[in-house]
Amino acid sequence: MSAQEWVALVFLIAGCFFYLAGTIGLLRFGDVHSRLHALTKADNLGLMLVCASLAVLAANWRITALLVLTWLLGLLAATVSAHLIARHARRVEK
């Protein structure tokens, strides 16, 4: 294996670890806000590392740009959905 493949493998394993950590946080934490925090932070970092792994192996800059765009759209979607869920949970708690 080349050095490029080793770097991609390390990023991929780290990304899978953060996905697993976010999932465990979602299942183990008690309140909605803690669950959202664990899930959005860990999953966003996991998505970034998986996209970085694929970008290292990418053949050209166009694929890398699409992976960055995918990561940014994932960040936006996670932020908006977490905000809406937290706002709804706050209204229900009152």
Image: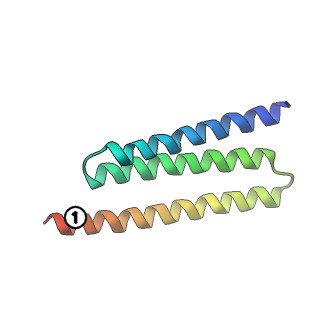
Judging by the rendered image, the residue that carries numbered circle 1 is 90
Residue shown at 76% from the left, 32% from the top: 6
Q: Within 10 Å of the Cα at label 1, are there few (<14), some (14-19), or many (20+) other Cα atoms?
A: few
Residue shown at 44% from the left, 46% from the top: 23
Residue shown at 68% from the left, 33% from the top: 10
- Hey, which quadrant is residue 4 in on the image? top right
Identity of the residue furthest to the left in this view: 94
Residue shown at 62% from the left, 44% from the top: 49
Q: Is residue 20 above or below residue 67?
A: above
Colour mapping? rainbow
Quarter holding the N terminus is top right
- Hey, which quadrant is residue 3 in on the image? top right
Element type where label 1 sits in the image: helix
Q: Is residue 83 above or below residue 27?
A: below
- Hey, which quadrant is residue 68 in on the image? bottom right
Q: Position of residue 17 (x, y in %)?
A: 54, 38
Q: Position of residue 36 (x, y in %)?
A: 36, 54
Q: Does 19 sit left or right of 8 as displayed?
A: left
Quarter holding the C terminus is bottom left
Question: Mark 1: which amino acid?
Answer: Arg
Q: Position of residue 85 (x, y in %)?
A: 33, 65
Q: Number of marks in the image?
A: 1
